[in-house]
Amino acid sequence: MIIHQLIRHHIRHGADSGFYAMQSTDAIRWLNRNGVTLGEGCKVLDLGCGSGVFGIALKDLGCEVLFADASNWLPEDLEDASFQSIDIDNEDVSQLGQFDLVICSNVLEHLRNQTQLINSFSKLLKPDGHIYLSWTNWLSPWGGHDFSPFHYLGPRLGPALYDRIVRKPRVLIPFENLFPTHIGTTIKMIRARQDLEIVRVAPRYYTELAWLMKIPLLREFIAWNCAILIKHRAAE
């Protein structure tokens, strides 16, 4: 459980590289515990990589990592890293190839067409490959991101009141670069795919309490961020 560590770090240092490194390190431990083999010979796609913190951690373990995002925000010391520019919302991600592991961390809530991405997952995976999908669900305490907790007033009224009361600039705009997502709906979309199998579902920053994700309505509020491990199901 790292939620308390993340909150303490964020208060002291903000969302710096150390903050995201803590998240990726904990997620890698969770992947290992759930049977995902990492290291040499593991081909990884960090889809929607941002500054690449997750992919860097996997690269340090010996994985072969392809970083992919709309623009290259990787640090200068990764100038020789494999990077592919792609608009995840509007381009076919299957063009990136096939991988043993696809990391899609904190991307889903920023996509207009979330179904399109989920329907493309199996095309990105080798046989027995895995997807690590995590995102901040809308009804979580951080669902509105930079205007939380005003998002509980709705995606239109919430940010409007935030702007009037708080008067701080914000980057995210509902229905433009932030879209309401729900755990139950996302799980249903994945389960509707015969070529995908859900291995585990857990609240990302306190995976020890995975049993909470079995409670349909409650999980939407108590999961600060939802993590789903998905496996490619071979055709019968």
Image (cartoon, rainbow, N blue to C red):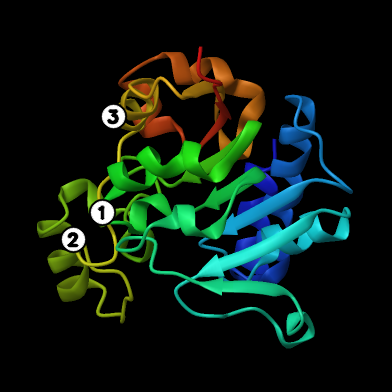
Image coordinates of residue 121 in percent, x first then y, are: 46, 40
Q: Which mark is residue 185?
A: 3
Position of residue 217 relative to residue 177, above or below, is above
223 horizontally vs 209: left or right = left
Task: Residue under label 1, please give it.
Answer: 179
Instruction: Residue 140: tell me if it is visible.
Output: no
Q: Secondary structure at mark 1?
A: loop
- Of mark 3 and mark 2, the one earlier in the sequence is 2
Q: Which residue extends farthest bottom?
A: 76
Position of residue 32 relative to residue 150, above or below, is above
Image coordinates of residue 22 in percent, x first then y, are: 73, 54
Task: Name the residue: 49% across, 79% down.
Answer: 71
Image coordinates of residue 15 in percent, x first then y, are: 59, 68
142 horizontally vs 178: left or right = right
- Of mark 1 and mark 3, the one earlier in the sequence is 1
Q: Secondary structure at mark 3?
A: helix
228 horizontally vs 18: left or right = left
Position of residue 217 relative to residue 27, above or below, is above
Label 2 and label 1: CA atoms lie apart by 5 Å
Whether the residues at callouts 3 and 2 have beta carbons within 8 Å, the answer is no
Task: Residue under label 2, please give it.
Answer: 175
Q: Secondary structure at mark 2?
A: loop
Task: Name the residue: 75% across, 79% down.
Answer: 78
Image coordinates of residue 218 in percent, x first then y, are: 36, 22
Q: Quadrant of residue 204?
A: top right
Label 3 and label 2: CA atoms lie apart by 17 Å
44 horizontally vs 211: left or right = right
Q: Quadrant of the N terminus?
A: top right
Amino acid type for the residue under numbered disc 2:
Phe
